[in-house]
Image (cartoon, coloured by chain):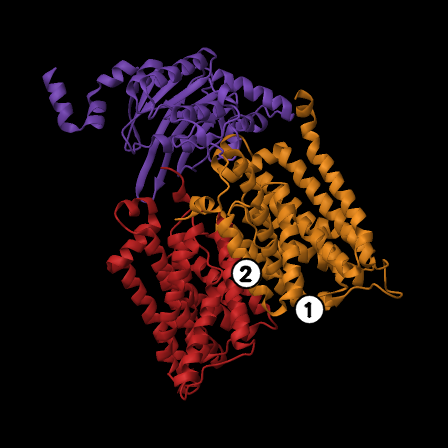
């Protein structure tokens, strides 16, 4: 029983972090119809930025994550503004390929700069834990979970309550109409991509604090983002958080009770089943029926 | 003039046969390293053509295409090792099993569109890789499986560099032939119509599900045949390699760079990219992935519609500027 | 004894969330009749067509083609039952020539021709009928609005349908272009094809319809002979608003 509760707690804490990783991915997909295959690379790059500022000036990773967010925001903004915008109107697989090319470049650049070794960002407290009954609550993970939930909710507020957020949603719904309303679509797209990259970078630093990372981990985070975004429904930010928690729990329980690496197959099984049964996601609205003219 | 028009339909056939003869003649001129490079090019010509059948003509981009490659390869490995079948039997059966698998997953997945289909197929491929990894008794698991190619256990003598050159050439020729036949056929019309507007295609009487599933199976068949041959060539295979998502992406990149939805495009794309990739690997070992990424980016930005389509349009309109081309697709 | 109607809908309904786009529509259209369907924007005209052709699944009710229950059947099955349609927003196959656009229907329609050369010949004949022969090798993107609408028409005719559903084929056309479309519809009528015309252009409906059905908020408001329906105060109100209707009926 205790081991079950321990796994559940671990899954929830990890799930919040996964939700923060996926929320930007989902936003980019929902608003721009771009599936960003470099998203996982942004996560890992964020971890390296956090690690680097910690190495240079000893900055605590929970502050360093803001540096990572800023750096990744700038990178994301620039990439969208001057590169991805060039092919936004091309066929579906063009943006997939372009971001795959980015993924190759970023991962390889990290390999060259930092080597393929596993790293972790050291703190004096992240490894400590609280004890509740027989259950261990790791402090770093608890903090990361709290930050993830707060940031995700802040993003929801930003998108729903501010001018910038509304222009993002408007552009996502109807780009031509938004442009007629005076919204600068190129800038809004870049902003959206920048926000997504910034959040990925922030999550990356926390990942690097509560666990380990190396460049090869990038593709795993991209795939998890897929699964979570689909589970939660495209562009649905609460959905991403819920999807993250679901995947966190599924993986934690599977890790507890399934042998070998069957745990990896499970996430994909969930993905494929959800796509077939409910392509609009667990909490999303049905995109498909709405497509036909009424 | 009239005579020229009458001969025109024969041009692709004649050039195809000439190309095949040239490839056969080339073999004796190559030393073994070069022969292996050219063999790899043939392999990717076949793979890119197979992907193009559904991804290019019908616009359904399968990002899990490598699953057929892996299934063909692992079927061959398992059947040769455990059931002592000859390679040739395994080759045919491996292709058939991959085709059946394509039909099976195609029925639910081909209802999904765009990115959803791409990702669902990717999910299937990653999932099947995990299944193969987690059945060590049958597949050797992550440690890999070695096909019996020497000694008493060998059911078919190893083909060697020359043999694989010819076999992969045959597969490439088969794939080009199939692609050409599909392009000009009734099915080709239906696939192109589906690409443009699936609802309108259905309204014209096209049983869209059936044609998509059959095409996916056909594409799986060819990919499975290539995977089976690759497994035999490599002797020892691992799930990480046989289900490597990079193989799928290479197929897509080759088709896109060459020109999707054409017969010539995947051929041109596969030759260019595989050649370039090999050159980079040999000359810039530690940077070659980085450079490959950069090349992919430059290629899709400058030629989103592919080299073949770009040249066709440019010849018609007289507009050769790549910048004008970029302007057509940018925001 | 009356012959089985070509198209029959029984209590056909479709909801989108809380909106009843089509509700309880029962129609019966005998062979050879031309029926006009009118109604203000959002009355459910296009939804009705989509329900008949299988592009939308009904929430309840039945669709019978020649007495066969084809409720919720897939679009290609409906097409093979002899039904052809046009789309309100034209849907040409952009990567293909005008001739190839038409050939698709000949290859895959109810009379499925297998030989490519035969299909091309027949496509040419359909293009001649619809005055598109000169544009056979053009890309659909190069066509004018009127020609694009005619291509939509030609694609439907390529199926050699018994029932033809026309969804606003005259929208955005000029006077002379409307005349030529009407001429085409009259020719089809003489061949005994059953036609449903959904249209905003009232003059067009009057010119060709034997009977008019008025939809309003997804329901059948009234139906009858074109003249009678147009002078019905309910119809006037639905189209032009309450106050205008009062003034008109009060004044006359």
Question: Is there a contact, CB below 8 Å, between mark 2 and mark 1?
Answer: no
Q: What residue is drawn where x is 75% and y is 55%?
A: B229
Helix, strand or loop at mark 1: helix
In the figure, the orange chain has which letter? B
Above or below B138: residue B194: above
- As drawn, the label of residue A96 is none
Above or below C250: residue A9: below
**In the rendered image, which residue does mark 2 sit on?**
B293
The residue lying furthest to the right in this view is: B152
In the image: residue B226, left or right of residue C180: right
Q: Residue A122 appears at what percent x and percent y?
A: 44, 85
Q: Residue A276 appears at what percent x and percent y?
A: 51, 52
Viewer-nearest of discs 2 and 1? 2
**In the rendered image, which residue does mark 1 sit on?**
B141
Chain C color in figure: purple
Parent chain of label 1: B
Q: Residue B125 appears at what percent x and percent y?
A: 60, 58
Instruction: In this rendered view, identify the residue nearer to me: B227 or B78.
Output: B227
Q: Quadrant of the C terminus of chain A?
A: top left
In the image: residue C91, left or right of residue B144: left
Helix, strand or loop at mark 2: helix
Chain A color in figure: red
Q: What residue is drawn where x is 43% and y is 43%?
A: B328
**Cα distance in 3D space between marks 2 and 1:** 30 Å
Above or below C16: residue A141: below
The residue carrying pointer 2 sits among few (fewer than 14), some (14 to 19) or many (20 or more) residues within 10 Å by Cα, namely: many
In the image: residue A277, left or right of residue A27: right
Instruction: Report whether mark 2 lies on the same chain as mark 1.
Output: yes
In the image: residue A267, left or right of residue C229: right
The residue carrying pointer 1 sits among few (fewer than 14), some (14 to 19) or many (20 or more) residues within 10 Å by Cα, namely: some
Residue B87 visible? no
Parent chain of label 2: B
């Amino acid at each position: 029983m205790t081991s079950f509760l321990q796994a559940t707690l671990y899954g929830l804490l990890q799930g919040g972090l996964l939700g923060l990783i996926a929320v930007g991915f989902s936003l980019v997909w929902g608003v721009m119809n771009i599936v960003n295959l470099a998203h996982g690379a942004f996560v890992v790059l964020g971890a390296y930025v956090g690690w680097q500022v910690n190495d240079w000036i000893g900055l605590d990773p929970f502050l360093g994550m803001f540096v990572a967010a800023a750096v990744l925001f700038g990178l994301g903004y620039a990439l969208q503004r001057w590169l991805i915008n060039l092919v936004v109107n091309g066929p579906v697989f063009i943006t997939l390929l372009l971001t795959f090319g980015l993924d190759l470049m970023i991962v390889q650049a990290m390999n060259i700069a930092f080597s393929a070794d596993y790293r972790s960002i050291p703190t004096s407290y992240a490894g400590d834990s609280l004890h509740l009954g027989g259950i261990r609550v790791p402090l770093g993970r608890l903090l990361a979970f709290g930050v993830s939930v707060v940031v995700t909710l802040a993003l929801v507020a930003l998108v729903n309550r501010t001018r910038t957020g509304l222009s993002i949603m408007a552009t996502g719904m109807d780009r031509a109409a938004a442009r007629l309303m005076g919204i600068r679509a190129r800038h809004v797209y870049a902003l959206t991509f920048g926000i997504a990259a910034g959040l990925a970078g922030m999550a990356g630093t926390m990942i690097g604090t509560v666990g380990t990372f190396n460049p090869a981990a990038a593709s795993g985070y991209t795939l998890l983002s897929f699964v979570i975004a689909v589970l939660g429904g495209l562009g649905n930010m609460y959905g991403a958080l819920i999807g993250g928690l679901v995947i966190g729990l599924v993986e934690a329980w599977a890790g507890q009770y399934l042998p070998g690496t069957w745990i990896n197959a499970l996430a994909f099984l969930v993905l494929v089943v959800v796509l077939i049964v409910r392509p609009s996601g667990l909490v999303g609205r049905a995109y498909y029926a709405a497509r036909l003219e009424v | 003039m009239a005579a020229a028009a009458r001969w025109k339909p024969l041009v692709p056939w004649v050039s195809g046969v000439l190309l095949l003869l040239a490839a056969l003649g080339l073999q004796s001129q190559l030393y073994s390293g070069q022969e292996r490079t050219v063999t790899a090019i043939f392999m990717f010509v076949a793979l890119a053509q197979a992907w193009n059948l559904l991804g290019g003509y019908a616009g359904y981009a399968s990002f899990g295409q490598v699953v057929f490659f892996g299934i063909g390869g692992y079927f061959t490995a398992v059947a040769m090792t455990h059931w002592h079948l000859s390679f040739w039997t395994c080759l045919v059966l491996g292709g058939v099993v991959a085709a059946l698998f394509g039909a099976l997953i195609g029925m639910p997945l081909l209802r999904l569109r765009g990115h959803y289909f791409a990702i669902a197929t990717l999910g299937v491929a990653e999932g099947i890789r995990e299944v193969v990894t987690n059945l060590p008794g049958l597949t050797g698991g992550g440690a890999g499986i070695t096909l019996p190619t020497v000694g008493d256990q060998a059911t078919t003598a190893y083909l060697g560099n020359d043999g694989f050159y010819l076999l992969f050439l045959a597969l490439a020729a088969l794939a080009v032939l199939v692609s050409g036949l599909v392009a000009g056929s009734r099915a080709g019309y239906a696939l192109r119509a589906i690409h443009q507007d699936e609802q309108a295609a259905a309204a014209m009487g096209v049983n869209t599900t059936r044609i998509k599933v059959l095409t996916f199976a056909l594409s799986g068949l060819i990919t499975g045949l290539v995977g089976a041959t690759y497994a035999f060539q490599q002797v020892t295979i691992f799930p990480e390699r046989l289900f490597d998502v990079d193989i799928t992406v290479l197929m897509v990149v080759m088709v896109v760079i060459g020109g999707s939805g054409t017969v010539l495009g995947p051929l041109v794309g596969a030759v260019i990219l595989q050649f370039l990739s090999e050159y980079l690997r040999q000359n810039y070992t530690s940077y070659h992935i980085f450079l490959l990424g950069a090349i992919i980016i430059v290629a899709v930005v400058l030629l989103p519609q592919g080299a073949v389509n770009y040249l066709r349009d440019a010849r018609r309109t007289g507009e050769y500027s790549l910048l004008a081309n970029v302007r057509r697709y940018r925001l | 004894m009356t012959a089985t109607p070509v198209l029959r809908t029984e209590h056909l309904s479709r909801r989108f969330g809380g909106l009843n786009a089509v509700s309880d529509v029962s129609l019966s259209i005998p062979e050879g009749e031309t029926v006009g369907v009118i109604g203000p924007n959002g009355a459910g005209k296009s939804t009705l067509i989509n329900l008949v052709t299988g592009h939308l699944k009904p929430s309840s009710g039945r669709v019978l083609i020649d007495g066969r229950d084809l409720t919720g059947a897939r679009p290609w099955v409906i097409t093979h039952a002899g039904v052809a349609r046009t789309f309100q927003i034209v849907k040409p196959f952009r990567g293909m020539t005008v001739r190839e656009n038409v050939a698709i229907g000949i290859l895959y329609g109810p009379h499925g021709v297998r030989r490519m050369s035969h299909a091309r010949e027949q496509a040419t004949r359909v293009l001649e009928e619809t005055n598109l022969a000169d544009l056979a090798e053009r890309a659909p993107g190069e066509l004018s609005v009127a020609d694009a609408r005619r291509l939509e028409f030609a694609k439907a005719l390529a199926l050699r349908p018994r029932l033809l559903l026309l969804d606003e084929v005259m929208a955005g056309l000029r006077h002379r272009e409307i005349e030529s479309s009407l001429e085409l519809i009259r020719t089809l009528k003489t061949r005994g094809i059953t036609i449903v015309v959904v249209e905003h252009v009232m003059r067009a409906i009057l010119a060709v319809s034997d009977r008019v059905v008025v939809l309003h908020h997804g329901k059948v408001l009234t139906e009858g002979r074109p003249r009678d329906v147009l002078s019905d105060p309910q119809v006037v109100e639905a189209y032009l608003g309450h106050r205008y209707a009062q003034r008109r009926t009060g004044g006359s």
